[in-house]
Amino acid sequence: MNGRLPLSLRLYRAGLVALEPGAAAVLQWRMRRGKEDEARLKERRGLPSRARPPGRLAWLHGASIGETISLMPVVERLLRRGLQVLMTSGTRTAAELVARRLPPGALHQYMPVDVPRYLRRFLDHWRPDLALFAESEIWPNTILELDRRGVPLVLVNGRLSERSFRRWSRAPDAARALLSRFALCLAQSQADAERLARLGAPRVAVVGNLKFDVTPPPADPQALARLSGLMSGRPVWVAASTHSGEEEHIIAAHQALAAHYPGLLTVIAPRHPQRGGDIQDLARAEGLEAARRSEQALPEPGVELYVADTVGELGLFYRLTPLVFMGGSLVPHGGQNPIEPAKLGAAILHGPHVHNFTDVYAAIDRAGGALPVADGPTLTRILADLLGDAALMRDMARAAGEAVASLGGALERTMQSIEPFILHMKLEGL
């Protein structure tokens, strides 16, 4: 282990040991609220539900849907190299997506809570030979336990926002102690790399954003054909990955536009599908006919607002519309990833709050593939312009796709960077 820990980390570690019963209670509370999977709750306490396969094993972790998706190409490459792969995630929605998209041969478990005993159970069972964590996953006890066992830890698709940098800067000794235990940090951008280095990461490289190299999300062919038939001839737009406080603006935009675009269908795909009922109620309170996909309803001709409150179907809806508004951006959440709709041929709109994907949106905006909207009324106005100009939407969609394609290559650079670790694992396995 790299030297003596600073007091803040020693207190954190001791606190999690003392509060382990509280952690178990929190998991029970989250389960009652639907935030944990009851059938697999033991995984969050480090108790495995699958056997460890023989051979050298790489452990990949992505906290939520976006991080998990970005790791899929890496999973495929590692499997091709003959390694066993374990993927972990921290949310139910990510686990549901993994069940659909994880390549055959890879395993999924929930990430254990950052409690020392839970982590020891997890690591004693899985015995990873390499750990790859996505974006900004910095869990102190996990990092310390991997270091104690001599397991190389690599940060892939690394991202550290200015806000997170300021927060970690208030505990510089803790940040340095943790980041110095990463064998390598592969950053999305130069700015991310500089922030990681300033906090104490000794080995940092810029490789780009893995999300540009992810295969577009799939769509069920039968569902695509059925919905395409139902929507044929109707003006359609999708508000994707929306957050609370945005749906009111979307509904208001629909109401303002419906008189000018007969048959207008607005699709709302909330970031958290469990909010589907609330969104339907909100629309009905405004006099709109609303239906929910989770209830097996379809966007029949009388439906004005269709709530796509399911997991893993954004690829379906991106293929059904030429126009997508990306949520999490009219409220100060930081925006959601626009790469998937760009790859699937959609013109993109977004609000002002996109700091989670600053470089991505800047590139697509510069290319003319996306337009920023400052607020709800501006969203309505720009939607009106685009719904009336199919040629402009096609031009924007083409520009968005070209911008995203030009920014690829992070997968190859990532694999080249971790090749020494892979070779070491394979040599040790001889």
Image (tube, rainbow, N blue to C red):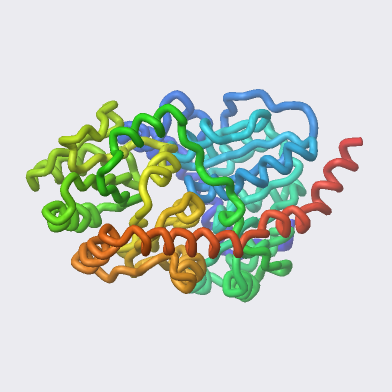
Residue nearer the viewer, 240 or 422: 240
Query: In the displayed structure, does residue 152 sit left or right of residue 428?
Result: left
Residue lying at 34% horizontally and 58% vertically, measured from the top left: 390
In the image, taking residue 371 as reference, residue 202 lies left or right, namely: right
| Number of numbered discs on residues | 0
> Relative to 100, is 311 on the left or the right?
left
Quadrant of image for the C terminus: top right
Quarter of the figure with residue 311: top left
For residue 380, above or below residue 54: below
Position in image of residue 368 (x %, y %): 44, 70
Instruction: Give the x, y percent position of residue 257.
Output: 16, 56
Which residue is at 18% across, 57% downward? 253
Picture coordinates of residue 93, whole percent (x, y): 43, 39
Q: Is residue 3 left or right of residue 362?
A: right
Q: Residue at x 55, y 62 (%)?
A: 402
Query: x%, y% of residue 60?
Result: 64, 44
Q: Nearer the viewer, residue 140 or 311?
A: 311
Can residue 15 be seen here?
no
Among the 4 quarters of the image, the one containing residue 39? top left
Q: Residue at x 70, y 52 (%)?
A: 153
- Image quadrant for the N terminus? bottom right
Residue 391 visible (yes or no): yes
**In the foreground, 69 or 57:** 69
